[in-house]
Amino acid sequence: MRLVVDENMAAGRHAFAAFGDVVTVPGREIDTEDVSRADALMVRSVTRVDRGLLGGSDVRFVGTATSGFDHVDRDWLAGRGIGFAYAPGCNANAVADWVIAALAALAAAGRRRFGGGSVGVVGAGHVGGRVASRLAALGYSVRLCDPPRAESEGGDGFVDLATALDSDVVTLHVPLVDGGPHPTRGLIDGAALERMPAGSVLMNAARGGVVDEDALATRLDDGPDLVTAIDTWAGEPAIDAALLPRIDLATPHIAGHTVEGRLRGTAMIASAATSHFGVSSGWDWRSELPAAPSASTGSDPVEAVLSAWDPRRDDALLRGLLREPPGERARAFDRIRAACPQRREFASFSVAGDAPAQIQATGLGVPDPADRVG
């Protein structure tokens, strides 16, 4: 069996070695020639998987080690009888950590206090649910907005988008959906941005296309009354360099990139491939984990969080994009993304002694019983 695997997939060679011949290729460079003789394709979010890529191949199974799948034409795969698997929830802890760390960094910069106030969580799936639990523990009043869930489960416990936007913090955790009853492309448009109160925070760790970036630039040009923390960008890797200087905290689509999250994603699609092909990989993702790190807690939750991971370092790396010639910026985005240091999930940290309740609420040193293993 021949498998083509994104070279940036965590432990990809180890996870799929038992299946046969593993060929690794940079995700954005996987082409029809690479997959022409492949039996399986394992990707991350940067590879577009559709008829154009696989139409002339013998691929029988596609796995994406990501919690989203808008880069995969699932209908076409299903029509061809090609198996498919993704990794829902694999990076939920990682993205929740990003939200907490981003809020801590904004607080350290004097842009927004840490804890308390209201937060609109738009999208209450694996990631949004984890974010909501963490923020509630930190004392935020959480407003969940998830129209598909509200429609299927009843409206109790959910608010509409207008109510969510009228919050001190709005954090986005929806998939990128173009059609159907609940499209999300351009969900945060000019009208939505105008609803947000002065001094409120907009955070996007979902997909870049969820925010209308032209409208965001206009709102930011109107005055510095909107605070922004952005991890995902429209048009990646060719992001809008003119928008970047206007953003308070900017990271290069790495919110879900923890050691644990990436390994968990690989494990989940390896498990699905095992079921599909009847081949056991015999690989345990925990064997790849380094020793648990430690956090300097003290009594200040902001300092504790930033001692574990300070996103301002990744922000500084991304702003280096502006020093690149315009024609090189797309390639530079991918280089910068790959250069961001690997980080650990807060739950993996060891914390000496009994940490104050607010530090525990950040997730530092607190194993999550809902963590998915795959």
Image (tube, grey):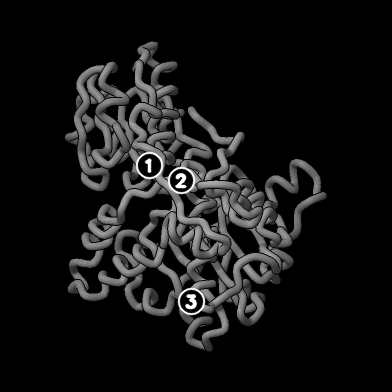
Please tell me whether residue 46 is drawn above or below residue 224 in the rendered image.
above
Label 3 element class: loop
Q: Say whether disc 2 or disc 3 marks the residue closer to the N-terminus.
A: 3
**Few, some or many C-alpha atoms within 10 Å of disc 1 (few <14, some 14-19, many ≥20)?**
some
Query: What residue appears at the point 34 percent right and 17 percent down from the top-left corner?
Result: 281
In this rendered view, identify the residue nearer to me: 206 or 62.
Answer: 206
Instruction: From the top left corner, tell me how far across and down residue 42 is, in percent.
Output: 32, 32
For image coordinates 43% across by 59% down, the residue present is: 307
The residue at which mark 3 appears reads as 109
- Residue 134 picture location, percent across and down: 63, 52
The answer to whether marks 2 and 3 mark residues whose Cβ atoms lie closer than 8 Å is no
Q: Which residue is mark 2?
A: 345
Q: In this view of the protein, can residue 269 be seen by the observer?
A: yes
* Label 3 crowd bin: few (<14), some (14–19), many (20+), radius 10 Å: few
* Residue at the far top in the pictured view: 278
Residue at image x 37%, y 74%? Answer: 244
Above-or-below relation of 198 to 304 = below
**Which residue lies under the disc numbered 1?**
259
